[in-house]
Amino acid sequence: SKMISAEAFSIENLCVISEGNQSAMSYVTKILKDDGFRRLWMTLSEAYECIRRGQIILYKLRYLN
C-alpha cells in the first residue's frame, strides 16, 4: 500500500486513539512502517540538514569574518 496522505496524523484522528480503540494505533503503526512514509521522512530529513548547513555557513560569513 502507498501512503496517499497524512490524514492519520490529523488532530481529529489522533484524538480517537484510546484504550478502547487499538485499531487506530495499529493504523498509525502501519503507516510508520510503510516504505513510502520512510522515503518521505528521509527526504524531509535531508532537506532539513541542507537548511541547517546553509544556516551555519551564513552565520559564519556574517559574524565570524
Image (tube, helix red, strand yellow):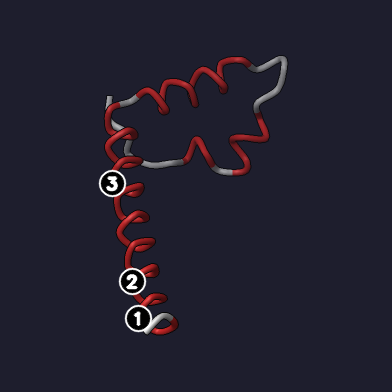
What residue is drawn where x is 47% and y is 22%?
29
Task: Give the camera-side residue of 65 and 37.
Answer: 65
Q: Residue at x 49, y 26 (%)?
A: 28
Q: Secondary structure at mark 1?
A: helix
Q: Position of residue 59 (x, y in %)?
A: 41, 76
Q: Quote the CA–CA distance across marks 1 and 2.
A: 6 Å
Give the residue type that dot 1 points to.
Answer: Leu
Q: Residue furthest front?
A: 65
Residue 14 in the image, given as x and y percentages of width and height: 61, 35
Q: Is residue 11 left or right of residue 33?
A: right
- Name the residue at 72% across, 16% down: 19
Q: Position of residue 11 (x, y in %)?
A: 62, 43
User: Mark 1 and mark 3: span between their CA atoms?
Assistant: 27 Å
Disc 2 is placed on an element classified as helix
Q: Which residue is mark 1?
A: 61
Image vertical order of residue 13 relative to residue 1, above or below: below
Residue 56, placed above or below residue 62: above
Relative depth, front residue between 35 and 44: 44
**What amino acid is at disc 3?**
Thr
Residue 57's disc is 2
- Count neighbours of disc 2 (C-alpha within 10 A) and say few if under 14, some if 14 to 19, many if 20 or more: few
Label 3 crowd bin: few (<14), some (14–19), many (20+), radius 10 Å: few
Image position of 28 with respect to 53: above or below: above
Q: Nearer the viewer, residue 33 or 51?
A: 51
Residue identifier under label 3:
43
Instruction: Check contact, mark 1 vs mark 2: CB within 8 A.
Output: yes
Q: Quadrant of the C terminus?
A: bottom left
Task: Give left or right: position of 8 versus 42.
Answer: right
The disc, 2 or 3, on the residue closer to the chain's N-terminal end is 3
